[in-house]
Structure formats: structure tokens, C-alpha cells
Image (cartoon, helix red, strand yellow):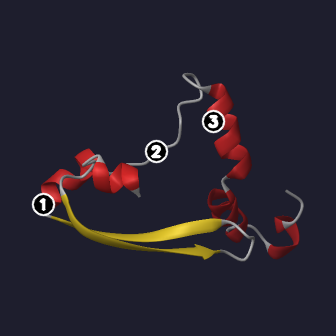
């Protein structure tokens, strides 16, 4: 939280609150709500928040880690398969 609130990653922080929860597989995740002194407008969001898969040519190790642990993508792939084929992967 210090990184986000004291280093002005999104701007000067007015106040904040967070909650940490554990998923069924035991992995923690956080819900964070931050109030900023100056608003971020919709056209600024993509400059601040983004996500993408790593380029396998630039970082093969990171790409392989993502491929191995990306259970959401695997779930989407399996959900399109016939039930009897899903657990063979």
C-alpha cells in the first residue's frame, strides 16, 4: 500500500481502504479503494492501468510461466471442449 499511497503512483492520495481475502485455492488477493485528491479521467485510464501477455520472443521464460499458470485461459479453452475431453489436458 505504501507504494500506491506514498509514492503517488496514481497521484496524491486523499484516503484509502483495503481488504485481503483468500480464494478457495489458498491464494490471497486484495480489494483496494483509493480516493485521489485530483480525479483521473476516463481518457487517462489506459496510460495508468494495462495488462498483456509477455512476448515469447522477448521473454520466453516469463511467457512459459504465464502459459503454465494461466488457469483462466485454460478454463476458457476447456469450456469450449466436449466434457469428456476436458480433463485430458
As drawn, is 45 to the left or to the right of 88? left
Give whichever of 71, 40 is nearer the camera: 40
From the viewer's perspective, tell me whether residue 77 is left or right of residue 47. right
Neighbourhood count class around disc 3 (C-alpha, 10 Å): few under 14, some 14–19, many 20 upward: some
Looking at the image, tell me whether mark 1 or mark 3 is earlier in sequence order. Answer: 1
Side of 45 relative to 80 (left or right):
left
Label 2 crowd bin: few (<14), some (14–19), many (20+), radius 10 Å: few
13 or 48: nearer the viewer: 13
Rendering coords of residue 86 (x, y %):
82, 66
Question: In terms of secondary structure, where does tag 3 sit?
Answer: helix
Q: Quadrant of the C terminus?
A: bottom right
Q: Determine whether label 3 and label 2 are within 8 Å by CB.
A: no
Q: Are marks 1 and 3 in contact (CB under 8 Å)?
A: no
Q: Position of residue 16 (x, y in %)?
A: 31, 70
Residue at which label 3 appears: 63
Q: Dot 2 corresponds to which residue?
A: 52
Residue at point 59%, 26% (across, down): 59
- Between circles 2 and 1, the one closer to the viewer is 1
Q: Residue 1: percent from the left, percent from the top?
A: 41, 58
In this rendering, the label closer to the viewer, 1 or 3: 1
Return the residue at label 1.
Answer: 41
- Choose the circle earlier in sequence order: 2 or 1: 1
Instruction: Give the Cα distance between marks 3 and 2.
Output: 11 Å
Amino acid at each position: 500500500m505504501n507504494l500506491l499511497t506514498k509514492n503517488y503512483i496514481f497521484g496524491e492520495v486523499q484516503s484509502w481502504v483495503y481488504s485481503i481475502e483468500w480464494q478457495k485455492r489458498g491464494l490471497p488477493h486484495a480489494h483496494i479503494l483509493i480516493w485521489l485528491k485530483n480525479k483521473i479521467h476516463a481518457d487517462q485510464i489506459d496510460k495508468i492501468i494495462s495488462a498483456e501477455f509477455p512476448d515469447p520472443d522477448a521473454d520466453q521464460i516469463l511467457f512459459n510461466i504465464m502459459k503454465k499458470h494461466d488457469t483462466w485461459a485454460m478454463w476458457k479453452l476447456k469450456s469450449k471442449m466436449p466434457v469428456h475431453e476436458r480433463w485430458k489436458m
